[in-house]
Image: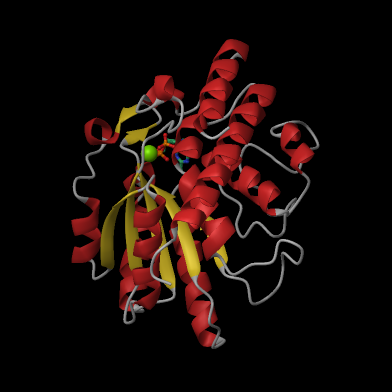
């Protein structure tokens, strides 16, 4: 199917809202973490984990699974929340985010969670890892899709562009990159700190099949993934224009929420706001 029906969209919106609520609760309990990118990407994660990915949460290391590489590891609360809601581990474990002894560290650690495909935190590494996985899958004649999720800020890292070139040279049509184009990074607006310009055109000029979408519109993202999966002959990128902090109006588009946990009043306000959307 090249589109989502209304029922599926409604179901995914409710899941994305649950993921957002979990993110707020986790960050409040941890007292630290990164809400803006995590909230902005909740729709994409809901779509991937609950409709797109070929995976089995009860058999997480199943060899035939698609691979999801999260490169910008600081937004991992959205990864953990999505995986817990999908059934990889108990929802109660989310409360242990960033605590000593927890599997859920502030940046994903593959040693603690072998079914998380990559450790991350140092930015700019994920695309190289995903390119390696895509080449390996081709060598072993697999039929997986390798999804790599990158942030816009990570494109300040030269290593990302080396991988962009290699993926194009190798014509990796089993690779789909989704860029969280939220226009913010740690200390301000991307265009002020290191202008990235038209990212879609940049990828195109490197030989990629490139699409620009509203990253909080499930139908648009789904259609782009469908087209990317059917594109043969080279790698695909989806520039997902997301709203950082999406769902909590007071935090949206404000880089100050890049890496700050809500206090109790802010968390209450945010949870009430999300509750009022899809009760
Ligand atoms: C190699 C490396 N350099 C610097 C950092 C510190 N750092 C963490 S997040 C971040 C901002 C990156 O921008 P982006 O991922 O777009 O941020 P977001 O949209 O989530 O606010 C930086 C510089 C890092 N984690 N790794
Ligand atoms: Mg960003």
- Residue placed most toward the observer, 163 or 173: 173
Q: Residue at x 71, y 41 (%)?
A: 104
- Residue placed most toward the observer, 235 or 187: 235
- Direction from residue 107 to residue 203 in the image, left or right: left
User: Furthest residue to the top?
Assistant: 265
- Residue placed most toward the observer, 243 or 3: 3
Q: Give the quadrant of residue 29.
A: top right
Q: Is residue 236 above or below residue 31?
A: below
Q: Position of residue 126 (x, y in %)?
A: 48, 56
Q: Position of residue 73 (x, y in %)?
A: 54, 45
User: Furthest residue to the right?
Assistant: 101
Q: Residue at x 70, y 34 (%)?
A: 97
- Residue placed most toward the observer, 2 or 87: 2
Q: Is residue 73 above or below residue 272?
A: below
Q: Position of residue 84 (x, y in %)?
A: 70, 47
Indicate the quadrant containing the C terminus: top left, top right, bottom left or bottom right: top right
């Amino acid at each position: 199917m090249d589109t989502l029906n209304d029922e599926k969209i409604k179901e995914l919106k409710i899941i994305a809202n649950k993921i957002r609520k979990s993110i707020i609760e986790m960050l409040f309990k941890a007292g630290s973490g990164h809400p803006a990118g995590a909230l902005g990407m909740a729709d994409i994660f809901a779509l991937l984990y609950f409709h797109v990915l070929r995976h089995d949460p009860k058999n997480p290391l199943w060899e035939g699974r698609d691979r999801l590489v999260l490169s910008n590891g600081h937004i991992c609360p959205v990864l953990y929340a999505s995986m817990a809601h999908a059934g990889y581990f108990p929802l109660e474990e989310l409360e242990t985010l960033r605590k000593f002894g927890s599997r859920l560290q502030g940046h994903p650690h593959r040693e603690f969670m072998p079914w998380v495909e990559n450790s991350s935190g140092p930015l700019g590494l994920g695309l190289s890892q995903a390119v390696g996985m895509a080449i390996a899958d081709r060598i072993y004649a697999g039929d997986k899709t390798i999804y790599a999720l990158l942030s816009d800020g990570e494109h300040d890292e030269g290593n990302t562009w080396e991988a962009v070139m290699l993926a194009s040279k190798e014509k990796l049509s089993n690779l789909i990159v989704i860029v969280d184009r939220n226009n913010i990074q740690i200390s301000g607006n991307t265009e002020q700190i290191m202008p990235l310009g038209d990212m879609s055109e940049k990828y195109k000029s490197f030989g990629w099949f490139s699409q620009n979408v509203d990253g909080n519109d499930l139908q648009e993202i789904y259609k782009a993934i469908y087209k990317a999966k059917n594109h043969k002959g080279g790698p695909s990128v989806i520039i997902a224009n997301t709203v950082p902090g999406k769902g909590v109006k007071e935090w949206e588009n404000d880089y100050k929420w890049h890496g700050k946990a809500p206090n109790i009043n802010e968390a209450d306000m945010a949870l009430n706001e999300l509750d009022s959307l899809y009760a």
